[in-house]
Structures are given as C-alpha cells and as structure tokens.
Amino acid sequence: MGSPFVDYRTPGDFSGAVTIIYGHYMKNGSMFASLAKHKKQSYYDAHPVMELYTPDGDYTIELFAGIIANGSIEFLRRDFDDDEDYLAYIETLKNASTFRSNVTVRADDRIVALITCSYEFSNARYAVFGKLVPHAEMKRP
C-alpha cells in the first residue's frame, strides 16, 4: 500500500508556506481514500478539519479548498513572489474548490496540500488544502 510521503521540494517539518503530502487512494477506504469524500459539500460540512500529529507538535488543519486537477500538469505551487501572490493562489484554490469554506488564510499562514488519485479522467488528482493551526506549544516526550 505504500505510505504517505512529503514532496521532496517542500519542507518535511511543515515550516514552509506550503507542505505537499501524497498518499494512495485505496479502494478499501484506507490511506487517502477519504479525501475524495470532500468533493461533496455535505461531507466537508461534517468534516471541516483534520488533526496532524508530529514529533515536534500537533496541528489542526482547517480545510479551505479541494480541487480536481490534472496530474499530468504541475498544478501545485511552492514558491511565491510576495504576500499578494500567495493570497492570489489561495483565492484561486478557493474559487476552484468542490466545497465552500469560510476559513480565512492570511499571508503568514502555512498550508498543507493532501493529494491523492481521482478518477474523473485519466491521471486526475484530488487535492485538499488546509491551513495549519498549531496546538498549544508543546514538545512530545
């Protein structure tokens, strides 16, 4: 089944503006299969956040967009010219989203993109984007 992995072009410690994580869409419902359920507004409404646990601290991921994209074309951005460019990217994602969210993303917020296969067309991908909100500062023992 493999395992989820962070894109080598983004920091694995979630310190960058964008961290990209890939995972398989497993037909048995495991791995990233549940991401595709966010294509429906009703599922998003019932599941608007995710939890991320790391050795260095925990986060809530407040989901703000989910898009169907062509995996044959680079649709993810990692670098931005300035704050306006970053916020324009966020707005583009929200406008293309399969669900509507009231989450506000500011220029200093970090986001996570969770990517899996989708089957609308050949090489389709479904990407869910969320804002990282750190839990109270703590280190795991």
Image: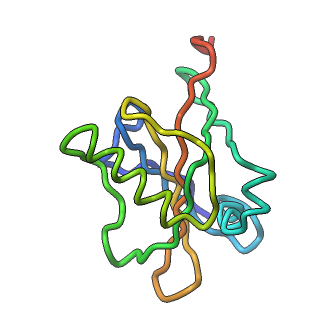
Percent coordinates x, y for residue 18 in the rendering: 39, 43
Q: If the image is split into quadrants, where does the C terminus sit?
A: top right
In this view, 71 is above or below 12: below
> Residue shown at 33%/49% (left/top)?
8
Residue closest to the eye, 38 or 58: 38
- Left or right: residue 56 compared with residue 18: right
> Residue shown at 57%/49% (left/top)?
64
- Left or right: residue 35 compared with residue 117: right
- Quarter of the figure with residue 110: top left
Percent coordinates x, y for residue 53 in the rendering: 63, 31
> Residue shown at 40%/74% (left/top)?
71
Q: If the image is split into quadrants, where does the N terminus sit?
A: bottom right
In this view, 22 is above or below 121: above
Residue closest to the eye, 113 or 30: 113
Q: What residue occupies the far left of the structure in this picture?
A: 81
- Quarter of the figure with residue 52: top right
Residue closest to the eye, 63 or 7: 63
